Image (spheres, grey):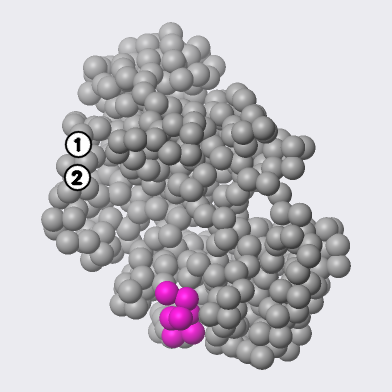
Amino acid sequence: MESDRLISSLQAICGPQAVLSNPAELLAYDCDAFTLEKAQPLVVVLPDSTDEVAQIVSLCHEEGIPIVPRGAGTGLSGGALAPEGGVMIALTRMNRIVELDARNRRALVEAGLVNLRLTQAAHAHGLCYAPDPSSQMACTIGGNVAENAGGPHTLKYGVTTNHVLALEVVLPDGEIVWLGSRTDDSPGYDLRGLLIGSEGTMGIVTRAVVRLVPLAPAVRTMLAVFETVEAASEAVSALIAAGVLPAALEMMDRLIIEAVEESFHYGFPTDAAAVLIVELDGLEVGLDRETDKAIALLQAHGAREVRRAKDEAERARLWAARKKAVGCVGRLAPSKVTQDGVIPRSQLPAVLKAIAHISERYGLRIANVFHAGDGNLHPVVLFDERDPDQVERVWKAGAEILETCLAVGGSITGEHGVGVEKLAFMERMFSPSDLATMAELRRAFDPEGRCNPGKLLPTSKSCLDTRPRSQA
């Protein structure tokens, strides 16, 4: 189909203002948050309803044109790139809370709704939406579904798949279906679960029924300060082993602390090697006793100081520091990429030491800020992408980080996804028969492979490059 005719057809569906084809406009859609790869779509369309999405997808299906779903573009693995061009369907105009049913603790929302807006709306009813990625202020529910996103508080409350009951999906041929149920359980195969984390390769999620949870009656938040990263990581395992289950347990190392403090002057100890943000929640009765137990354990494992947030304002400052941390490292280097490996908690000291050796070997600074309680690492590799030699070293360092995670029984991603960046590593983590089964499942939804092509599964058609990718 000629591009002019395609653009005219899309404008007829969504209106001229909702179709972007000017090269200058498309520049904003050629990458995601921190991916070195770039790939520009032929056209970007911004539908306002599920019906418009279905019409767009039907048109592309009839013409054999690839489609790429996109949320806020906060992804970290290239999942919203358009390696084969085609039509990018950006869902950011579909950002409404259709229904908030506080009595049944449910909400029906559109895929382009910003995550934080849902929790803000639920707060008035004493509820919240538990998955809280660090990009919560910008990322969308649809993007969270695509990557099965987590966040600091999912240590206790679970990731996206634990809070999504049903999904409205436009299949790659334009058919609209609902998967799952408004109830807590439903018979048959869990196709809802299959779509969550499928990175937009099986269809485009347009609406979701999500579970809301009550706000905790009481909360205690602490900042534990350590002289060494090893001591901080040992303390993480000690807390969990002792039966203390924090709502959140996050680690930041010296580089991150320095960047955050320089940016916002929160009062973080810049001489510390690492800090842990530890949050406990539950009933008021007994929570102080649990907090005292946690503090004693932290001190027994090397914390030189444990500060308690004295009020909600101080707690909010701690969490603002954590959620803005990766953005703050822009003060340290012109470019950065964020990894996303997962390891057993008991392996934290050894793996963090290995990352430090990788940093030295490749002459790259690597900052660490991550979900320590989950063993979900986010090493941030700092460099200058204008220097080809540094870029090559970033590829190699990132590959070694992922290999280290696999060597201790971990995974190549916890919440950022495979996208285009980790395709080669899928063959290191799964057997050929595993990957063949996944490909067969994908074909059941998308026989022609035009729904978010070049993502998730390492086929000859989808790989942009045979080099191991280091970013996530």
Res 20 visible:
no
Assess disc 1: are there few (<14), some (14-19) or many (≥20) residues with their C-alpha within 10 Å of its C-alpha.
some
Q: Is residue 201 magenta?
A: no
| Residue that appears at 44% across and 63% down | 340
Q: Is residue 13 left or right of residue 325?
A: left
What's the distance in space between the residues labelled 1 and 2, CA to CA?
A: 6 Å
The total number of labels drawn is 2
Q: Nearer the viewer, residue 84 or 246?
A: 246
Q: Are marks 1 and 2 in contact (CB under 8 Å)?
A: yes
The amino acid sitting under disc 2 is Ala
Position of residue 422 measured from the top left corner of the image (x, y, whole percent): 32, 58
| Residue matched to label 1 | 443
Element marked by disc 2: helix
Q: Is residue 381 left or right of residue 39?
A: right
| Residue matched to label 2 | 439
| Residue that appears at 67% across and 70% down | 278
Magenta-highlighted stretch: main secondary structure? Answer: helix
Element marked by disc 1: helix
The boundaries of the magenta stretch are 344-350
Assess disc 2: are there few (<14), some (14-19) or many (≥20) residues with their C-alpha within 10 Å of its C-alpha.
some
| Residue that appears at 44% across and 31% down | 181
Q: Is residue 249 above or below residue 180?
A: below
